[in-house]
Every structure is written in structure tokens, then in C-alpha cells.
Amino acid sequence: MGLDLYEIGREGARTTWRHVLAVTRCHHPDTALARAIDPERAAWQVNVELLAQLQDTLSMLAWNLGGQHGAKPKRIPRPGTKGETTTYGGGESWTPESFDRWLDEMTEN
């Protein structure tokens, strides 16, 4: 598929901006363009993703069949994901009484 970028905008050119846009949006994950745009994701082909999913499933199955002893197995990290857990709050906990006081204050107005 050779694209001649020098042709863009010239009279009678085969390569147009629309053609360039289509190529950059619809590129195959194996291409050099895909590796240049997102190298981490380009390394994860479909077969690698399926193997990671298989490993995660087998680990979880073994953990379940083993009586769920020990730590729950962690998933193999995928590209583009930050992690499995998200922490909310700053670690301050409320007693039921303090929550009731707060709720009363909020509903008084």
C-alpha cells in the first residue's frame, strides 16, 4: 500500500488527507504505525491476550478448587490498565455514632 505524502494536496494526487486519516485510524496491530502510536499495546496481540486470559482463568479455577486458601490470584497486567485496586478516602473511619451525628446535621437544613 505505498502512500506518497508528498502528493497530498496536489492536482491529480492519489493520496488524500482522507486516505491518510483512514490508514492511521484503521491500521492493523502488527504494523509499524501501531508500534509507533502505542508500543505497549502493540506488543499485546490477540494470541497473547488470549493466553493471559487463559492463565488468569486457570489460576482462579485452581484457587477455587483448592478451597480458596491463600491469597486470591492476581490477573496478569494488561497494557493500558493502571491496576486492579482503587483506594477511596484517606483512611479515616467513622463510628456509627459519628455517622449518625453527621447524618443528623445534613438533614437538619
Image: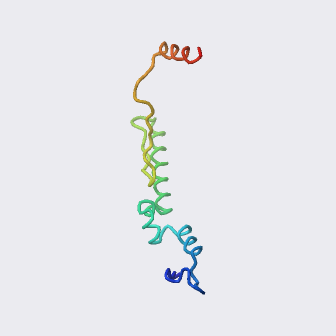
Give percent across and percent down for residue 22: 58, 71
Residue 91: quadrant of the picture: top left
Image point 49% across, 62% down: which residue?
A: 47
Front residue (pair 36, 6): 6
Q: Classify residue 6 as left or right of residue 22.
A: left
Image point 45% across, 33% down: which residue?
A: 88
Q: Is residue 87 above or below residue 22?
A: above
Q: Which residue ends up furthest to the bottom in the rendered image?
A: 12
Front residue (pair 105, 33): 105
Front residue (pair 107, 73): 107
- The quarter of the rendered structure image containing the C terminus is top right
Q: Is residue 19 above or below residue 74?
A: below
Q: Is residue 31 above or below residue 41?
A: below
Q: Is residue 49 above or below residue 2?
A: above
Front residue (pair 61, 84): 84
How many dots with numbers?
0
Image point 41% across, 63% down: which residue?
A: 39
Residue 107: quadrant of the picture: top right
Render colour scheme: rainbow
Residue 93: quadrant of the picture: top left
Give percent across and percent down for residue 95: 45, 16
Image point 59% across, 86% down: which residue?
A: 11
Give percent across and percent down for residue 18: 59, 73
